[in-house]
Amino acid sequence: RREINLFPSLRILCSIAERVYTVHMDTRRRIIQCALRELDSEGLGGFSLRAVGSAAGLSAMAVYRHFKNKEDLLRAVGEEAFAAYQRRVADIPDAPIQEWIRLVGREYVGFALDDPGRFEVCFVLQTQVERIYPNDFRAGKSPVISLMVQKIQAAQAAGQLKSADALEVALQLWALLHGMVMLHRSGRFSLNRSAFLALCDRACELIVNGLSCMRVQPVRANKRTGNRRSR
């Protein structure tokens, strides 16, 4: 009897399946990117699968093949936005605690200035991905806050920072920077980018210096403070 070699057919089927998966994932990514732009321009009130599909060049039914409903798409957008922010923080080099916190603060403010759509999704809108204090943070569900807590605890153990609840310290720093950013977004600062970042540096410094067991060289205000609006 003549034997049939099935391996070429299997290779062909695997190749077709791989191409179909690639197209599927590319389309999914395109929908998420269009959803981010829609949220940035229209806000949550004008957000719909139909609008996102139109922006992506797809029918509403095509969008439904990738996302069950608007909430499912919002969750995917939230996950993508948080991943983008986490990559920024992960790239921060190791440094003494005062400098590391300053750099984290810069990344948070820079994220708000450079990528307002993703910032909105992460820290303003409800996408069912946001972490809720205290349980989610105590459980370590926020990679950035968990990393900050670990850094603070290590500095406390080394005698560099005073004893305090590390999570509450991280929360206070986050709340301070978020308040600065939201005031900036509402047009309450007439500062250029570098001047606004320096102001945020000094705001973080006030909290860290209050907890420091060491004498810290203060960040001096730039005498040439700009008066152009930050971008």
Image (tube, helix red, strand yellow):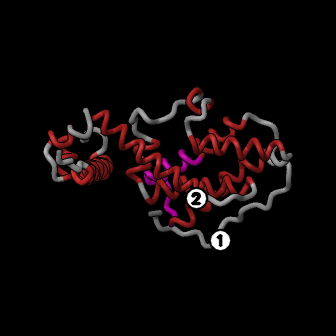
Q: Which is nearer the eye, 225 or 210? A: 210
What residue is at 14 percent from the left and 39 percent from the top? 61
Disc 1 versus disc 2: nearer the observer: 2
Can you identify the residue that label 2 sits on? Answer: 91
Can you identify the residue that label 1 sits on? Answer: 223
- Residue 218 location, quadrant: bottom right
Q: Tell me the amino acid under the disc marked 2.
A: Asp
Highlighted range, magenta: 177-192
* Quadrant of the drawing holding the C terminus: bottom left
Q: Is residue 135 magenta?
A: no
Q: Is residue 184 magenta?
A: yes
Q: Tell me the amino acid under the disc marked 1.
A: Lys
Exactly how many numbered labels are in the figure?
Answer: 2
Task: Determine whether 198 is above or below 1 in the image.
Answer: below
User: Residue pushed farthest front?
Assistant: 1
Residue 186 rendering spot, x and y as whole percentages? 43, 50
Task: Determine whether 229 is above or below 142 in the image.
Answer: below
The label on residue 161 is: none
Q: Which is nearer the eye, 183 or 144? A: 144
Task: Tell me if I can see residue 123 in this picture.
Answer: yes
Q: Secondary structure at mark 2?
A: loop
Residue 134 rendering spot, x and y as whole percentages? 59, 28
Is 98 displayed left or right of 142 in the figure? right
Q: How many C-alpha atoms fall within 10 Å of the one at disc 2: few (<14), some, or many (≥20)? A: few
